[in-house]
Image (cartoon, rainbow, N blue to C red):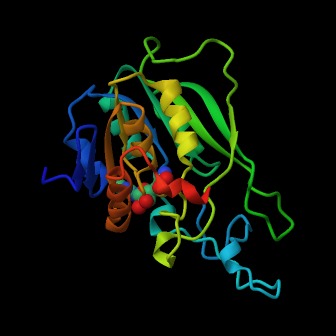
Amino acid sequence: MSEPYYSDEHVTLWHGDCLDVLANLPTASVDAVITDPPYNVSSRNGRDGTMPSSLRRKDGTHRKLQRDFGDWDREWNPAPFLAHTARLLRPGGSLIAFTSEFTLPAYLDSGLNHRNVIYWRKTNPTPAFRKLYVRAVEMAVFQVNGTTGWTWNGGGYIPNVYEGPTVTGFTVANGQSRYHPTQKPLWLMSALTAQHTIDGEVVLDPFAGSGTTLVAAKQAGRKAIGVELDERYCEAAARRLSQGVLDFGEDAS
Ligand SMILES: C[S@@+](CC[C@H](N)C(=O)[O-])C[C@H]1O[C@@H](n2cnc3c(N)ncnc32)[C@H](O)[C@@H]1O
């Protein structure tokens, strides 16, 4: 492999297609894959009818509805990434992957041991402006490589619902403080890291975006490997990671 885009004592971030990078990582070298891949919810016509506040005019009317996060979020097939995940997870290693109803079937077919679905209930969801429910919940799958030995911190009565705010505000590209259009909140990725890994374990995020999982892992004393296709988001992740324990990307949440 060529040089990483960013590296420090805890984190290595690669710029490129994760399928190429994962093919070069050693078998059973990862304790947990904690990731937020594409969900295929983008549509030039706004598939779920939600209205970003950035489209609202001052007079209360709206610009044309559009919910399009980028080409990476259309017609994406999880299967090749899941095949790599099965090889890279140690026996008992966990996969936590955010998904939608559009990509869930591929996860249920992953060949890993499906344990649970985890929900994140947003306390500040984006309003819907059509005859539709507001998308106030996102889900992630919790799957394990094998039937024993996964890391589980904290007893037998942990509900599968995390509650809290999403990251709001405009993107850094617009001169504001959010780094990625689909950025996950740091509090959420930190909670999942704390639940599913222990000190010194290796966390992999093949769809790192602005690096929220990597920041959470670093702050918790884990080792982390990230991959991101879009160099703008590698740059944002590198900036966040080099800020140390302070993460200003949460200012907007
Ligand atoms: C849902 S976003 C992740 C956002 C991230 N959780 C955050 O908080 O910033 C998914 C990311 O995966 C990246 N991506 C899509 N396909 C990829 C691939 N084949 N390899 C690496 N990254 C990819 C996209 O560029 C996008 O930034």
At a point 46% along the width and 49% down the height, the residue shown is 212
Q: Nearer the viewer, residue 125 or 190?
A: 190
**Residue 197, picture quadrant:** top left
Q: Nearer the viewer, residue 20 or 1?
A: 1
- Extreme residue toward the bottom, this view: 59
Image quadrant of ligand 1 equals bottom left
- Extreme residue toward the right, this view: 131
Q: Is residue 165 left or right of residue 14?
A: right
Residue 96 percent location from the top left of the image: 50, 35
At a point 83% along the width and 62% down the height, the residue shown is 132
Q: Is residue 120 left or right of residue 37?
A: right
At a point 69% along the width and 44% down the height, the residue shown is 164
| Up/down of 133 relative to 188, above or below | below
Residue 7 percent location from the top left of the image: 22, 47
Q: How many marks?
A: 0
Q: Nearer the viewer, residue 84 or 182?
A: 182
Residue 46 percent location from the top left of the image: 67, 71
Please indicate, yes or no, whether residue 168 appears anywhere in the rendered image. yes
At a point 61% along the width and 67% down the height, the residue shown is 169
- Look at the image and tell me in which quarter the C terminus lies: bottom right
| Up/down of 36 relative to 47, above or below | above
Please indicate, yes or no, whether residue 38 appears anywhere in the rendered image. no
Residue 246 percent location from the top left of the image: 44, 48
| Up/down of 211 relative to 172, above or below | above
- Extreme residue toward the left, this view: 2
